[in-house]
Amino acid sequence: MEETVKDYKLIFEKEGVYLHTNAKKTVQETGIPGFIRIVERAGVPALEWSPLEDEGHSAPAVLYSRKDGEGGEEDTNFDPGYEPDWAVISTVKKDREHAQVKDSGQWAFSLPLSELYSLRRARFSLGRNFMVLMSRGGHPLPPLHFHRGGTRELLRALQHYIILDQSPVDGRLFLAYPRDSNSAAFHQSFDKLQILEDGGSDIVSRFIHDPYATTFGGFSKVTNFFRAALRPPETSVTQTNQGPGLPSQPDDEPGFELITCGVELGPRPAVTRGRALDQWVEFLDSEGRVKEPQKVKELVFRGGITPPLRKEVWKFLLGFYPWKSTSTEREDILRVKTDEYFRMKVQWKSVSEEQEMRNSLLRGYRSLIERDVNRTDRNNTFFSGNDNPGLTLLHDVLMTYCMYNFDLGYVQGMSDLLSPILFVTQNEVESFWCLTGFMELVHQNFEESQEAMKQQLLQLSILLKALDPELCDFLDSQDSGSLCFCFRWLLIWFKREFSFEDILTLWEVLWTRLPCDNFHLLIACSILESQRGELIGSDHDFNTILKHINELTMKLDLQTVLREAEAIYLQFVCCKLIFFGRLSTLVSDAVQLGGFFLILSIFGHLL
């Protein structure tokens, strides 16, 4: 059925808005002139863009319909003038279904305003400002450039349908909320909360025990708190007569001032690495218990483990043996675990070919495992050559893991996690149970929904924005702001980025869970920051950035990366914030940086 005039209402229209089909990737300009509109279709507001060539010559250059007050009185005599442009950007919102971005033609789009998640101003490497849209469902759209201005009026029109609130991490990022009765009341109620006044001294304990309730209960105050804390002292915001919730504009437009993204982290301290753990017996008491587990972990974090001790210490780090177990208890554990392992192994070994033909899931797992085993670390002597017993062990342990966790089964990449463990233990049973311990840490990486991977990439993006907003802007300008090229890093913990020997050291450092649970994200930040000189100011586009990152394989110095990652951690720990009306460190020794990442994680759900 065709759309009727009654169902359609034009709220705002602006000509001279260029859609860029990724001009930075080609020598020639690839901007397509067109119209940006806010329309209501059957009462549902949407932001739309269509190319000029589809409009004929009947569309006026600028149409603006502004409602004043509840009466809905419209004013069409409005000159939008000129002002610097903005950028709209967003991240994937979890835990609910989203409307698909409606495409018409190759480049035209229509995005319901309920699916717009945030608004961010950015100035990219060619000096232009873009509007880069992404829906809550994660559907990216090409960047838009307002060649003739008009973005402030677009924002004012948007304000009739959405609420904009500044991000706590990036002064140029504004969160978008639907302006319906429920969400408006919800938003207004934030301003009445006083979580930083007297009586709020238990906020940290409430935040740790019930982070989501605490965050949702005081998000506006938390937002303002982080906004003030993460902005450099010399930066200020000019108060204007703009509408409530409307973000400030750049200072080259009268009455507005540019809010830059700055984080007062202080100097990055120098960090030194220590010696590898080379003594083990001295940490055991007369019954074989580990006397000081935390000291062992600290030594491992500081310098790793010498090769002769890895086989024993890894079994503690990965939970095969409890730290407080005696030698006798460990013998009992090994006996029980050995029996349990072989009972599970018999399950898949006893499946006949006829049975497997009727079990597509098991057949699929076996096919994937056989394919991956034949290409996993074949340069390592333990897995090299044909008919190598190491390959047989790799295959059997992975097949048995399918019996242990049939819901997850086998996913590509798991063979990369097992091979170093099998190389160190050289024992089928011990390698299996160490793998289960490792998978307890990373199993969400391999879930079909990929929600954990999306969340980690989001957290990494937030961290990098705080550490190096210029690098983030450059990556955004080259369609690389999602950091998708870091996916492999996080999925298998940098397994293919470092040498095999370096991975043994890196993983044992990460297994200590020191100094925070998300230390692998700081390692990723360290690597990205080390490449900023190569990336910024270069001719890299999306493809060459991806190529450059992939070519870092085996070229990174692990000790340098670890030093810088720890230094970044210390920057966050030493970051001074005004908390509860007094100067305090962002993270106490008790909370560790894990608490800060908890904050980032929660904001990650809201951004």
Image: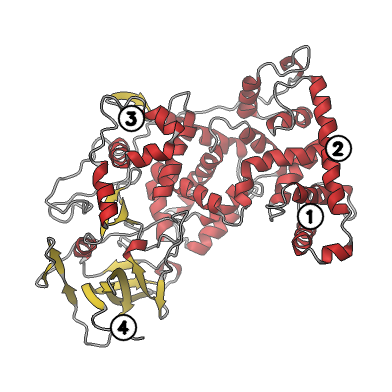
Residue at screen point 43% across, 43% down: 602
Where in the figure is residue 494, as x and y percent of width and height? 62, 46
Q: Is residue 409 left or right of residue 156?
A: right
Circle 1 packing at 10 Å, graded few (<14), some (14-19), many (20+), is many
Q: Which of label 4 and label 1 is nearer to you?
A: 4
Q: Which of label 1 and label 2 is nearer to you?
A: 2
Q: Disc 1 designates what residue?
A: 373
Helix, strand or loop at label 1? It is helix
Q: CA distance from mark 3 to mark 2?
A: 54 Å
The answer to whether marks 1 and 2 mark residues whose Cβ atoms lie closer than 8 Å is no
The answer to whether marks 4 and 2 mark residues whose Cβ atoms lie closer than 8 Å is no
Residue type pointed to by label 4: Glu
Q: Disc 4 designates what residue?
A: 3
Circle 3 packing at 10 Å, graded few (<14), some (14-19), many (20+), is many
Q: Disc 2 designates what residue?
A: 339
Q: CA distance from mark 4 to mark 1?
A: 57 Å
Identify the mark nearer the N-term, 4 or 3.
4
Q: Residue furthest front?
A: 182
Q: CA distance from mark 4 to mark 3?
A: 54 Å
Q: Disc 3 designates what residue?
A: 577
Helix, strand or loop at label 4? It is loop
Identify the mark nearer the N-term, 3 or 1.
1
| Number of numbered discs on residues | 4
